[in-house]
Amino acid sequence: MADEKSLQEYKARLQKVIDHVEKNIADKLSLDTLAEVSCFSPYHFHRVFHAFVGEAPGEFVNRIRLEKAASRLITSPAEGIAQIAFECGFASSSSFARAFRVHFGCSASDWRVGRLEELMNRKSRNENRGRQETFAMSRYCADMDSKSAIERIEEMLSKTEIKLMPSFHVAFITRQHGDSERIEKLFDKLRRWAGMKGLLTEETRFLGIELNNPKVTAPDKSRYYACVTVPTDIAPEQEIGITNIAASRCATAHFEGAQNEIAPAYDELFRKFLPENGYQPADMPAYEIYYDNSRKIPGKKFSLDLCVPVENWKPCQSLEP
């Protein structure tokens, strides 16, 4: 029992460091600063962090900075590259340029132009749209009942709305590097914890947050938060963290289907609904709200809202004729 408590305490400390990095990415995140957040000595912190997370602290911070910058290059085309680099914690444009090319294999400007041109071409393409869109979706639906999957996604898009979503105060469990637990196991743990605390009511909501952009972050590095809404006086404990999901304007799409249809549903929101309606993704992670206590369980149908924070489309001057 004591060993299990120690293990959970280690994970809780490291999760606190990860949260600190996410929320303070523009700051100087030195080893001493992160060690202080973790309550480990700088020497031991480096070893403990690498053992649990799979990367050295400096490597982790650099990767998160690069991934955030890569996402903003796509979602914030009006911002300058130097500004994005600075706000993601890089000391100079030259250091950012070198690190970006090493990590992604191309320059930041090539990364941005390639993806923005693709997005604008999709937005302006009118001829043969129906045939092309059906083909695009069918690529994702090859391993399922393609016709029914496409119909469900098309119905979802037709009913997608822009809503001002409220803030959510949540408790969460996250799957860290090396954890073998599937997402449904995280929700099972969270449900048991909330049940023992007497926190499950008719107003309780279960949410999921993908903290990384799956187009940028390797699957083995991706982090997922399984969340449940809780009162504001609930404190974190061991592997249970507490955070707020900020209020935001979202493209909200209600989806009912199988787990392997979620990715194409998201792709169609980004590929079709946002550009066609004059929006682009805001610099916040998307999240899911589950209904009827549904969770991501392979092979089972479930009901959820896909919530993508958005802002008005900002055209890139360099791509305009």
Image (cartoon, grey):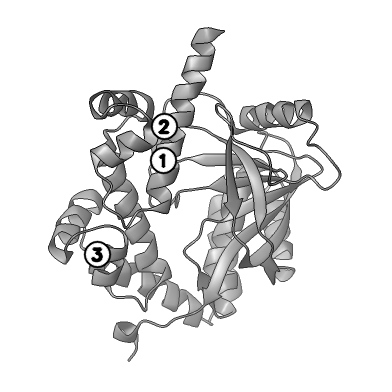
Residue 5 at x, y = what percent? 53, 15
* Residue contact between numbered discs 1 and 3, judged by CB atoms under 8 Å: no
Quadrant where the image shows the N terminus: top right
Q: Mark 1 points at which residue?
A: 18
Disc 1 and disc 3: Cα gap in Å?
Answer: 25 Å
* Residue contact between numbered discs 2 and 3, judged by CB atoms under 8 Å: no
Residue 21 at x, y = what percent? 37, 46
Q: Residue at x 23, y 70 (%)?
A: 82
Neighbour class for label 3 at 10 Å: few (<14), some, many (≥20)? many
Q: Residue at x 44, y 23 (%)?
A: 10
Q: Which amino acid type is marked by label 3?
A: Ala
Q: Which amino acid type is marked by label 1?
A: Ile
Residue 156 at x, y = what percent? 71, 62
Please, what secondary structure does the residue beneath circle 3 have? helix
Q: Name the residue under label 3.
A: 108
Disc 1 and disc 2: Cα gap in Å?
Answer: 6 Å
* Residue contact between numbered discs 1 and 2, judged by CB atoms under 8 Å: yes
Q: Residue at x 26, y 64 (%)?
A: 86
Q: In this view, does 293 lie to the left or right of 114?
A: right
